[in-house]
Amino acid sequence: MRAFAEKVFASETKDEDVREEISLFGVADCPILNQELAHHVTMYDDAERRLRHRLRSQQVEDSPTYLEVPHFQRVTITGDYAAGRKVHEAGTAEISPNRVAILLDRGGEVETERDQVQPVFTSPPKKGDDPFDTKSLAANAGYVARMHDGVIYVYKDEAAADKNQPLSLPAPDYNTFIDDMNFLIALIAQGPTKTYTHRRLKFLMSKFNVHEMLNEMEEMKELKKNPHRDFYNCRKVDTHIHAAACMNQKHLLRFIKKSYRVDADRVVQNIKGKDVTLKELFASLNLHPYDLTVDSLDVHAGRQTFQRFDKFNAKYNPVGASELRDLYMKTENHIGGEYFATIIKEVASDLEDAKYQYAEPRLSIYGSNPNEWTKLSSWFNKNRVFSPNLKWMIQVPRIYDIFRGRNFVPHFGKMLENIFMPVFQATINPQSNPELSIFLQHVTGFDSVDDESKHSGHMFSIKSPKPNKWDIVKNPSYTYYIYYMYANIAMLNQLRRERGMNTFLFRPHCGEAGAITHLLACFMTADNISHGLNLKKSPVLQYLYFLAQIPIAMSPLSNNSLFLEYNKNPLLEFQKKGLMVSLSTDDPMQFHYTKEPLMEEYAIAAQVFKLSTCDMCEIARNSILQSGLSHEVHSRSVLLLKRKQSFGAPVVLWVSRWLRQQSDRFIQGLW
Amino acid sequence: MRAFAEKVFASETKDEDVREEISLFGVADCPILNQELAHHVTMYDDAERRLRHRLRSQQVEDSPTYLEVPHFQRVTITGDYAAGRKVHEAGTAEISPNRVAILLDRGGEVETERDQVQPVFTSPPKKGDDPFDTKSLAANAGYVARMHDGVIYVYKDEAAADKNQPLSLPAPDYNTFIDDMNFLIALIAQGPTKTYTHRRLKFLMSKFNVHEMLNEMEEMKELKKNPHRDFYNCRKVDTHIHAAACMNQKHLLRFIKKSYRVDADRVVQNIKGKDVTLKELFASLNLHPYDLTVDSLDVHAGRQTFQRFDKFNAKYNPVGASELRDLYMKTENHIGGEYFATIIKEVASDLEDAKYQYAEPRLSIYGSNPNEWTKLSSWFNKNRVFSPNLKWMIQVPRIYDIFRGRNFVPHFGKMLENIFMPVFQATINPQSNPELSIFLQHVTGFDSVDDESKHSGHMFSIKSPKPNKWDIVKNPSYTYYIYYMYANIAMLNQLRRERGMNTFLFRPHCGEAGAITHLLACFMTADNISHGLNLKKSPVLQYLYFLAQIPIAMSPLSNNSLFLEYNKNPLLEFQKKGLMVSLSTDDPMQFHYTKEPLMEEYAIAAQVFKLSTCDMCEIARNSILQSGLSHEVHSRSVLLLKRKQSFGAPVVLWVSRWLRQQSDRFIQGLW
């Protein structure tokens, strides 16, 4: 299987322009397929159908007990279906495909295993409580953390560490991961699997279309009957947004102008021992803020950035000057990141005013040295950058090659250690770094970021060097990064759970561009992903994401400026098929025009895709479910959906086992 | 020609689904065509090219004298072009097609005639001046106004009226109009004309594309060099918006809830002598405002309204209750339209805060009785509905058939008289109706509105009954309505100009749906139109609108919910070809989601069509040029463009003369 996988990998990574749709009739009819279809349909029993109605009709927020299950029309599928053979399919199928997965993976024993691993989020501070208060930090557990082959293990003490006897926290299994990965690579390349999944997806879409035609008015009636709640005041989360671009261009412009009016004589830089005031800084750039416009600020993406991630990254520099980026959009500078903190707090204040809008901004940890966490958390605490409407994410850029090239790190293992060791240490002994410990309470997950269209060419396999042996300047592959981030987060979560602390989700950028293997790696490891555009290219993966209901934070406006034109965005298609999609802004500074970027994102999707209010509320609900919002907020929204989270071994094992079980007869028939 | 026109009319009105593009090679090559092309190209001499640069680079607002004409790249067209025949076309062609018309109609003597007829707008009140002050109203001129064959004429006195000797104000000529109309109907149906114009339009589009590819970065550099001004603070006008839907759905909802909190015990209705309070009104509807949501309010257009103008109109009733429409969105009700006035003033206040945004809301005059104007102007004055950021338009629904059916009017002439006579009288003797006279100062034009997809089947011709003879219940045709509105406005403008008063533009809804003849009628009569979608269907008319630079206020979000999906909207195509398009919201209540509907409209167009900042500023500039904003605002924006206005005979004569002259050799060759 490995050899086969390698062949597939080579062809998949080279051939980016695979046909988006495979021929429906490329493969001869297969009896297993028909059995499988019958099996799927019979799974809808009456009780479950009732539940599913409620889900579709459910708006985010309070469960409306007064709402009766409405009289939706149903599609009964009997007789000959899709295969030229009489298969009586019992039961009438309710159409909302979004619920299928929840129901499909019921009944498997694996489920119980997953039920146990729910993420832990910090509760919002009670009235009068200070979110920065360090008094209640846990005591030192006295554990020892050491990295072994790129993964940090926790030991009872130094002696246990020396003997390499880690605590019995379940650890992710490297070999299982590689095996599963090879299995999946082979799976996605099989003709019959492609045909089957393509057909299933098409069927799901058609079912949804029929459902909509029959029940659209019923759904609207239900919405109308639900008092107090409409799209405007159902909670929605901006599930993917970078802190450095969380303000819109006009906001940044206004802020720069204001800072100049108020702070012109403030020292904002020190260049070789010489203090530089704000006035002098602008003078040195031949600029006067009064003359600045949105055009000269030049942070907005345009036609020039399409398919040019490099040009897009340059847009982070206002007026093309990295000095201004450092001053206004960095946590670490001569003024202690004060301006950046103020801008973020202004954005948060807008969200608090809007009341039902939340955001999950990303801050960077690079891994070039171990002090980054201390500096970042110091900025967070000193500037008191807290808002009940913000949850924090840590983004790790995949730029080992740059650090290695400049000799900042000796090997990839060191980079991983810089990223994760401080968090392990603060988890073992919070008092040793109180500011970091506080900050971590408000962090809800990790992201992995960079231009996915860059290829490393390397294929992750058992032959790959371990991180401490990866000392070449070349960047490891996406999958390699993802696996080692995942493995460390999984270990970390085990430890934090044991210590009664909040845990972290793994929510990488994935499938925005690049090889299909990115989506495969994240299928095995991620709690949810950002973008997922390339699922268009693989019906098998698309179907798997659907079955596992792995959430996808989509940003069609961002894609429109970078990788895919708006009309071609698969958001609507995914939503109709029942993939769990949410809407997010990515970078309001670069992409949005109005004062309410998230509403702009929803409004444009609603207009272009002609979404109904029901669709929009469903997307908003999805955003809550995939977010790191506290259980207090969740509990008002979550009804039935269960979540998987990166808790080490169980998940990796689960993927493989679950998958084999899922497609049991089908896959057995092929292999 | 008439017989031919009738044949064409019959086929055009029946066949709505004409192919949108005609075959480029449907007609054999024609030597006149080639001459014509050569002629067009040689018209670009160097001096004009310089002017055109400035236009393209010009942002709305101050003329930046420091801006040098930039070094744009040019396309030189030499040798064999488009016809298989060597025609040396001298001169290098600058590409911005938007300017072509301005330059094309230079040099014709007709131009001087048009130069004389500029619209007159009321200046904004000086600081401290009260816009409602009646002191400076003009004295009684003592004239007499009488309707004759559907058009109101003005006479020195009763004696002159009895002798039918009107003042020598130039009057529109009925026969010329009919002749021109027949000429145009024949013109748009000619194969060679179609080929020629289709080719020209395609050429204009290609030229613009080349221009953009070559000069996009130069244009952006120029924008950046322009201090203080960017897209956010260049003035823009919502050129097409109905007052009754000028607030967004959330705004209306908030207002209803607030009114209930404050005014629950206020008497808001009197039904058969019994006072009804707001509380009782809601109780009778089985509603409590506290429970209301945007969904139950149900004023937003959705998938259900597509191609269903009837359903769309029903959306004007909040919660489906016409009682609430009467209370909140009408000028005439038990509370004197106070709520409606307050809502509009709130919208105006948002525009004033945004500072650079203006709107031109439409209020209705129906013509069912002659007191409508007095009531409407009383509402305007009593509630002091004035804002420097609003200019008023009067919309006249084409619903004679309903009024006639209910016996409100004996014939169509009476309806016209009800609409126009009060305005003539207030113009002759302002003191006789001071409130109306004040209101008219703030009115800048007339609109003609209704569902264009309804057909009357009637063709306007010399055989058509005159308005005072049109006493059947059947509605006259669109063209009939347009001609008589135009003729009366033209007469009215002559009078008002003579009296030193502001004049009115004619800006009908046109080409949203229905027969192509609508666009033809408006080409001959309108200052600008709303929608214009159907120009897609006639290359000849499209080219004429381009040549004459008749502005088109487009509302792609409105179209998206009613007549045409967003992606198929011709806005981008029109803009590239050089038609003069602006963006407008139509009905924020039904179509928009955010707090800034006009910005939402621009943002969505920018995203879907990938407009550059330069494009967006150009569209904003177009909106100023076609609006009824005072010359004080105009003068900061208008550089070269001249405007035509409905001033009676000169315009009708001009259309025909200008057209014959324009296409001289071409048309002579065909006829």
Image (cartoon, coloured by chain):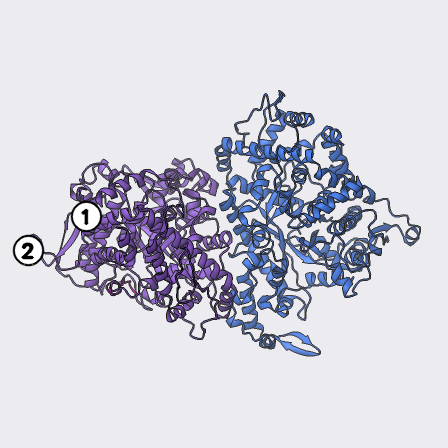
Chain colours: A purple, B blue
Q: Position of residue A80 (x, y in %)?
A: 42, 59
Residue A159's disc number: 2
Nearest to the observer: residue A319 or residue A459: A459
Would residue A422 appear left or right of B162 to someone viewing this image?
left
Judge the density around disc 1: few (<14), some (14-19), many (≥20) Cα neighbours within 10 Å. Answer: many
Give the magenta part as a residue range: A114-123
Q: Position of residue B40 (x, y in %)?
A: 65, 28
Nearest to the observer: residue B535 or residue A237: B535
Q: Secondary structure at mark 1?
A: helix
Number of marks in the rendered image: 2
CB under 8 Å between discs 2 and 1: no
Would residue A70 appear left or right of B505 to someone viewing this image?
left
Q: Amino acid at mark 2?
A: Ala
Q: Is residue A115 magenta?
A: yes
Q: In the displayed orientation, state which residue is furthest to the front.
A: A85
Q: Position of residue B442 (x, y in %)?
A: 69, 53
Would residue A578 appear left or right of A426 to someone viewing this image?
right
Q: Which residue is mark 1?
A: A417
Nearest to the observer: residue A348 or residue B555: B555
Chain letter belonging to callout 1:
A
Judge the density around disc 2: few (<14), some (14-19), many (≥20) Cα neighbours within 10 Å. Answer: few
Q: Is residue B495 above or below residue B331?
A: above
Chain letter belonging to callout 2:
A
Q: Overall secondary structure of the magenta stretch?
A: loop
Q: Do marks 2 and 1 share a subunit?
A: yes
Nearer-N-terminus badge (2/1): 2
Instruction: Determine the residue positioned at 47% across, 53% down.
Output: A605
Which corner quadrant of the image does residue B383 belong to?
A: bottom right
Q: Is residue B90 above or below residue B149?
A: above
